[in-house]
Image (tube, rainbow, N blue to C red):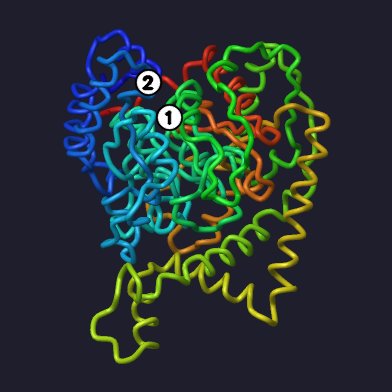
Amino acid sequence: MHHMTLAEIARGLADKKFSSEELTRTLLARIAQLDPQINSFISLTEDLALAQAKAADARRASGESGALLGAPIAHKDLFCTLGIRTSCGSKMLDNFKAPYDATVVSKLAAAGTVTLGKTNMDEFAMGSANESSWYGAVKNPWNLEHVPGGSSGGSAAAVAARLLPAATATDTGGSIRQPAAFTNLTGLKPTYGRVSRWGMIAYASSLDQGGPLARTAEDCALLLQGMAGFDPNDSTSIDEPVPDYSASLNGSLQGLRIGVPKEYFSAGLDPRIADLIHASIKELEKLGAVIKQISLPNMQHAIPAYYVIAPAEASSNLSRFDGVRFGYRCENPRDLEDLYTRSRGEGFGSEVQRRIMVGAYALSAGYYDAYYLKAQKIRRLVKNDFMNAFEEVDVILGPTTPNPAWKLGAKNSDPVAAYLEDVYTITANLAGLPGLSMPAGFVDGLPVGVQLLAPYFQEGRLLNVAHQYQLNTDWHTRTPTGF
């Protein structure tokens, strides 16, 4: 059963080939057996999962149906879950049990999903390797000596290792798409505002967006259907109708205009990945797509702009963790200043501290105009580039990452080298656009992803292109040895 996709599980449950409880018990046993190798979970919720599975079986027995009813998933450990530890991968929140469910959690629970647990992540979603977690690094099931990507590496590794069919994740600068590329999955970052951020502990509020990680575009469509929608609790949530994402999967690609930015194929891109991207372009051409070269001239400025804006917002968002109201508190503080200083110094890891300091510097009185304001102006230029491009093409295609997954610890002494790995993904967050990564092949036995970007609220178009590609290729069906 663990090799079944979310769509196959939905059909199996509907045909009464197995029950949700049987499936849940099978996957919980598999997690207990295999997860010690990859460290993809922070918390398991066996009692909750079995209760939800039994409830889902009862709902089906009473005549109710639904693609997600009885489907097992896991949540990235920054989505608040009532009465369950929500740690953000940090010592700071190791003892925090959320007093409510995030909107994503409550929506998916209402749809009948079964929560197996909370997945490991880079601390406060800050990282590209899932090595900054207080609970230890996550390992890539394709090669246990390599990273799975971050910050949603726990969700990605768990799905890739067939511990569960799908999981929720978040993307601030590529944290869904990059792990998807590194672990041979399909990952979708929706349009900013499409999925509620209420109850999703913030890293950078104007960039964060929740989305699905799964093996196929079809599965991502099912999970996004349950996650998306307007939420009055989130002031950035968009009141737009949610289309039936599954209904658009089988549309023809005949005449679809695909733009390929010339800036994507620079010296920084591994030539073997470039070859795989060109192969995927040829595959889409066979399906009727029309390829056109385009330009995104301000892409070169995206990384410096992102690494001013994101840390600036992080320094503000993380100021609430002060050792007073909730979370970690140092022992025996001498006074209030000592309480603040030691609680934050002991509770936050080095990567989080680094970004807080960078952000606080960029927002300081003497440097706000020189750094933060200028970065926001660059952000507008990046968005304008995309708006101009989408007047000529329907979808933009390129690599998800410039290199395959690196070895654990390889970039720990050079944070900037890890930041540069986000070069193709962060532009979608700066512009608020939807983006998807899908499997496109392997380099040295490690998966490679191809990225698709589309205009606002065109998630269905991305899923359609990816689904048609996956009907004609088999990269997404490959399974890591031993799992």
Looking at the rendered structure, which numbered label has been put on residue 214?
1
Q: Residue at x 63, y 74 (%)?
A: 363
The residues tagged by marks 1 and 2 sit, at their Cα atoms, a distance apart of 8 Å
Q: Earlier in the sequence, mark 1 or mark 2?
A: 2
Who is closer to the viewer here, 234 or 307?
A: 234
Under mark 2, the amino acid is Thr
Looking at the rendered structure, which numbered label has been put on residue 5?
2
Residue 216 rendering spot, x and y as whole percentages: 46, 23
Residue 332 rendering spot, x and y as whole percentages: 24, 85
| Quadrant of the rendered image containing residue 452 | top right
How would you rate the neighbour count of disc 1 (Cα within 10 Å): few for under 14, some for 14-19, many for 20 or more? many
Q: Residue at x 17, y 39 (%)?
A: 47
Rendered position, 93 above or below 38: below
Under mark 1, the amino acid is Ala
Q: Is residue 317 left or right of residue 271?
A: left
Residue 254 rendering spot, x and y as whole percentages: 72, 11
The secondary structure type at the circle numbered 2 is loop
Rendered position, 337 above or below 229: below
Q: Dots 1 and 2: beta carbons under 8 Å?
A: yes
Viewport quadrant of the C terminus: top left
Viewport quadrant of the N terminus: top left
| Quadrant of the rendered image containing residue 464 | top right
Q: Is residue 131 left or right of residue 385?
A: left
